Each structure stands twice: as structure tokens, then as C-alpha cells.
Image (tube, grey):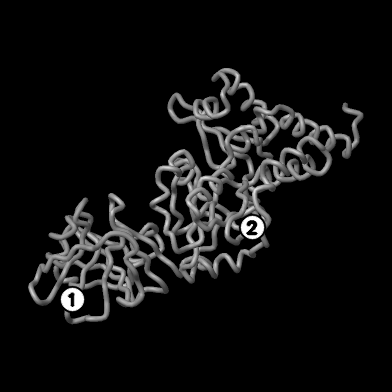
């Protein structure tokens, strides 16, 4: 029988967890997993080690309860075991390092903080700017991380593409540069904080977040604390950030922004809409014509019923975008799929139900 008391058992278990953090590769792996689930192959490539070495590190992380895996065919995928707790542990480790390690403090100060001196902007102030249309969120993470979750309406331009895509940034709005959750980051690699340096060359206004949102003409950019304004849509209270809805066509030649809540969201079963969209049914989101702005390109119009109905599309890629009728002269109906976050709109009624296809069965929420 063990002679250890309860406290000693706890201390032994905590020491095992600390051992899991006892290698730079494992800390870096945890930071990557903080952005979402990844395969062993992907992690090995990102950390720059062999597959076998990566697998050994991950098995240790799993044994001490910091990561968990699942098998899909011949591939094994890992994720954090308790997302917020592990991210909080990494953030705490980073804070202790900055406070107690002169070398870490020096690197952090010179690499992350010395770019600009700016006044802090609270989460509420940032959301107010987004709702007012005076700022835009620029997410510079890789495409795969952006797909796993992002702020509604965020524009994704990975850092490696940013310099050649500066023209995509609106010149009349503050740019809120946003990247990964904050962890125990290693500044030895090119950090997304370099986004502000790229934008500065173009003379843009930039903002970023570091625990609190920081905003002004130009600020530093750094990994983010998960408890403030999270990068993942699953962590965001949608009601706090959905007064602005952005959308566009498939090729990106047409972009628009709608402000405020729509006048209605409805299924439309008419034959004309089926012909226009190629889908068995359409979902339209109605906005007053004064409540949206085309921010890029132009919506080309086609009169499907001359003098009565005009349908909008992208002249470059053909994406269906809008429908306008003389019977509702102040409204524009947007196809729900044209919005960046179509999941935010739920239809509540049916139009032309008598024309519904007999084999189409819908379950209304």
C-alpha cells in the first residue's frame, strides 16, 4: 500500500502534468492544438520534427491528460483535453515566464510590445466600432485555422498573402488585425504581429488585440487571451456581434454589408427562383435598400419579369445574389447563401408554398 497521503498524490499528479510541459516541442504542439484538432502528420510538419518523434511527444501529452486523440482510418487526430483549461495553463505559464525570466521579458518587450504605444480599447468599444462600420476584422491565420472558427464577418488574408493583397483592405476603416489565441508563444518564428508592419507600409490604420483590444492609428499585434474576445465562432456570443452581416459572390468580385436585423427570412418555392438559383428552393433575407451597401464591385441585374422583377448576380462568376420586385420597392431580398454566415438566418415562413416540389420535405425550426 502506498504511504503517500492525499496531498502527495495530488502533487505527484501535478508533477506529471508539469513534465508534459517540459519540452519546447510539446508546448508548441499544445499551442497548435489550441487552434483546433490536428493530425499527427500535420503537427509534425508544423513543429518541424519527424513523425515518430511527434507521435512520442503526443503520447506523453495524452498520458498526463493535456491532449486526447481519436483514430480515423489509418490516421490519428489530436485535440486539447479541456480546451479552456489547457489554454489557460499555457497563458499562465507565459505570464510567469514574462515576470520571472529576464530573457523572456526582454524578447517579449522587444518583439511584441515595442512596435507602438497605444491606448487600450475595450471589447465593448471594439464591438461598437464593428457595428458602426468604422472597423473591419482582419484574420491573418492560415486558411485551415480560419475555417475551424472565426469572428463573424472577419476577412481572412493569411499573413503570407497579406503583402500582395493589401488592395483588398478598405482604406476608410480601421483594420483590426486578429490571429491566434494567446499561449506560451515562441517569438522565434515569424509572428502574425508582423501583419501590422506589412499594413504600416501601406499607410493603413491598424488595430489588434493583446488580452484587451488595443486600437488607434497603428498598434502591435500579438496572440490573444481566450477569455476576452475569442477567435472561434463557437466561443462568440453571436448576439453581440451580428448587427453587421457581410457577404459576397463566389469569386469575391462583389462584396456587400447589411446593417441591422433583416425585415424577414423566408423560403421561396416559386419556379422562377428555382430557375435562377438551380436549387429546389431558395431562402431570402430581406433588407431595406438603405440598410445595405455594396462595398466592392457591382451587382448585375437581370429582369426575369420585365418591369416587375429584377434578379442580381455577379457578372464574373454568376453567383446568385439578390431579387427585387416592384411590389416591394424599398426591399432587396438577398439569397441566404450569399452571406458569409448564412447560419445566422433562420427562415420563418414560406412563399408560394403551392409550388413546392412534391419530394421536398422541410422541417421548420
| Res 338 seen here | no
Q: Nearer the viewer, residue 217 or 256?
A: 217
Quadrant hosting residue 267: bottom left
SS for tag 2? Answer: loop
Mark 1 and 2 residues: CB-CB less than 8 Å, in contact? no
Which residue is the site of mark 1?
325
Q: Residue 228 — which label? A: 2
Quadrant hosting residue 47: top right
Q: Is 275 positioned to the left or the right of 232 in the image? A: left
As measured in the structure, the alpha-carbon distance from the residue carrying label 1 to the one carrying label 2 is: 44 Å
Q: Is 321 positioned to the left or the right of 168 in the image? A: left
Looking at the picture, does residue 42 appear above or below residue 136? above
SS for tag 1? Answer: strand
Q: Is 275 positioned to the left or the right of 176 in the image? A: left
Q: Quadrant of the C terminus?
A: bottom left
Can you give x and y, in whole percent of width and height, for residue 193 in the image? 59, 45
Q: Residue 184 — which label? A: none
Q: Quadrant of the N terminus?
A: top right
- Which residue corresponds to the image point at 54% horizontal and 63% vertical from the top-left? 237
Can you give x and y, in whole percent of width and height, for residue 327 in the image? 18, 82
Looking at marks 1 and 2 on the same chain, the residue that comes earlier in the sequence is marked by: 2
Can you give x and y, in whole percent of width and height, for residue 304 in the image? 10, 67
Q: Nearer the viewer, residue 60 or 197?
A: 197
Looking at the picture, does residue 237 appear above or below residue 116? below
Q: Nearer the viewer, residue 217 or 313?
A: 217
| Res 109 seen here | yes
How crowded pointer 1 is (Cα within 10 Å; few <14, some 14-19, many 20+) is rated as some
Can you give x and y, in whole percent of width and height, for residue 288 in the image? 32, 77
- Which residue corresponds to the image point at 81% horizontal and 44% vertical from the top-left? 99
Looking at the picture, does residue 11 appear above or below residue 242? above
Looking at the picture, does residue 283 appear above or below residue 180? below
- Which residue corresponds to the image point at 48% horizontal and 60% vertical from the top-left? 136
Amino acid at each position: 500500500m502506498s504511504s503517500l497521503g492525499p496531498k502527495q498524490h495530488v502533487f505527484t499528479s501535478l508533477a506529471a502534468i508539469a513534465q508534459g510541459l517540459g519540452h519546447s516541442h510539446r508546448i508548441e504542439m499544445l499551442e497548435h492544438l489550441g487552434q483546433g484538432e490536428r493530425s499527427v502528420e500535420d503537427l509534425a510538419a508544423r513543429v518541424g520534427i519527424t513523425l515518430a518523434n511527434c507521435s512520442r511527444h503526443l503520447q506523453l501529452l495524452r498520458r498526463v491528460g493535456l491532449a486526447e486523440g481519436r483514430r480515423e482510418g489509418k490516421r490519428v487526430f489530436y485535440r486539447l483535453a479541456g480546451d479552456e483549461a489547457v489554454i489557460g495553463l499555457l497563458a499562465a505559464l507565459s505570464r510567469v515566464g514574462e515576470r520571472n525570466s529576464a530573457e523572456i521579458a526582454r524578447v517579449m518587450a522587444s518583439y511584441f510590445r515595442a512596435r507602438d504605444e497605444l491606448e487600450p480599447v475595450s471589447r465593448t468599444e471594439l464591438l461598437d466600432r464593428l457595428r458602426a462600420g468604422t472597423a473591419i476584422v482582419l484574420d491573418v491565420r492560415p486558411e485551415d485555422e480560419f475555417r475551424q472558427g472565426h469572428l463573424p464577418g472577419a476577412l481572412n488574408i493569411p499573413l503570407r498573402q497579406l503583402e500582395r493583397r493589401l488592395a483588398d483592405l478598405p482604406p476608410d476603416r480601421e483594420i483590426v488585425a486578429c490571429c491566434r489565441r494567446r499561449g506560451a508563444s515562441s517569438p522565434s518564428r515569424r509572428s502574425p504581429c508582423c501583419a501590422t508592419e506589412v499594413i504600416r507600409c501601406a499607410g493603413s490604420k491598424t488595430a489588434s488585440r493583446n488580452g484587451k483590444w488595443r486600437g488607434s492609428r497603428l498598434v502591435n499585434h500579438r496572440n490573444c487571451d481566450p477569455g476576452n474576445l475569442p477567435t472561434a465562432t463557437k466561443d462568440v456570443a453571436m448576439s453581440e456581434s451580428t448587427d453587421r452581416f457581410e457577404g459576397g459572390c463566389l469569386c469575391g468580385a462583389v462584396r456587400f454589408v447589411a446593417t441591422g436585423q433583416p425585415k424577414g427570412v423566408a423560403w421561396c418555392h416559386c419556379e422562377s427562383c428555382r430557375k435562377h438559383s438551380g436549387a429546389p428552393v431558395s431562402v431570402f433575407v430581406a433588407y431595406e435598400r438603405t440598410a445595405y451597401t455594396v462595398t466592392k464591385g457591382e451587382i448585375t441585374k437581370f429582369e426575369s419579369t420585365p418591369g416587375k422583377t429584377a434578379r442580381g448576380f455577379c457578372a464574373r462568376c454568376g453567383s446568385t445574389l439578390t431579387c427585387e420586385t416592384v411590389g416591394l420597392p424599398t426591399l432587396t431580398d438577398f439569397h441566404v447563401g450569399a452571406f458569409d454566415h448564412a447560419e445566422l438566418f433562420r427562415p420563418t415562413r414560406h412563399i408560394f408554398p403551392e409550388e413546392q416540389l412534391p419530394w421536398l420535405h422541410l422541417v421548420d425550426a
